[in-house]
Image (cartoon, rainbow, N blue to C red):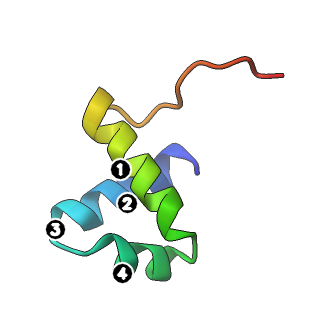
Amino acid sequence: LDSATVAQVVALINDGRSQRYVANFLNVPRTTIQRVYNRYAETGGYNRRPGSGR
């Protein structure tokens, strides 16, 4: 997901929406919402973690 979508995920969840609602609203898997929100909660940011990039 791009940074704007991640920001939307965080805003919706912080407004009291469930992860299931957000997943259905954005048409993405619930596990993706869970992973993205947990990453935001751990790091406080929207950016992806550095990786191998392959």
Which part of the image, by quadrant, shows the C terminus? top right
Residue count near mark 4 (Cα–Cα under 10 Å), binned few <14, some 14–19, many ≥20: some
Q: Select label 3 or label 1 by which is in front.
A: 1
52 vs 45, nearest the viewer = 52
Whichever of callouts 3 and 1 sits on the residue coming sooner in the sequence is 3
Could you tell me residue 22's position as x and y percent?
A: 39, 74
Residue that numbered label 4 is attached to? 21
Residue that numbered label 3 is attached to? 15
- Which three-letter amino acid code belongs to the residue tagged 4? Tyr
Residue count near mark 2 (Cα–Cα under 10 Å), binned few <14, some 14–19, many ≥20: many
Q: Select label 1 or label 2 by which is in front.
A: 1
Query: Is residue 44 at all visible to an observer of this figure?
Result: no
Residue depicted at x 45% and y 60%: 33
Residue that numbered label 2 is attached to? 9
Could you tell me residue 50's position as x and y percent?
A: 58, 18
Q: Give above or below for 51 relative to 28.
A: above
Q: How far, Cα to Cα, is label 1 from label 2?
A: 7 Å
Query: Is residue 41 at all visible to an observer of this figure?
Result: yes
Is disc 4 placed on a helix, strand or loop? helix
Whichever of callouts 4 and 2 sits on the residue coming sooner in the sequence is 2
Q: Give above or below for 2 relative to 48.
A: below
Q: Residue furthest right?
A: 54
Q: Select label 4 or label 2 by which is in front.
A: 4
Is disc 3 placed on a helix, strand or loop? loop
Residue count near mark 1 (Cα–Cα under 10 Å), binned few <14, some 14–19, many ≥20: many
- Which three-letter amino acid code belongs to the residue tagged 2? Val
Residue that numbered label 1 is attached to? 37
Residue count near mark 3 (Cα–Cα under 10 Å), binned few <14, some 14–19, many ≥20: few
Q: How many marks?
A: 4
Are the residues flagged by discs 1 and 2 in contact, CB closer than 8 Å?
yes
Is disc 2 placed on a helix, strand or loop? helix
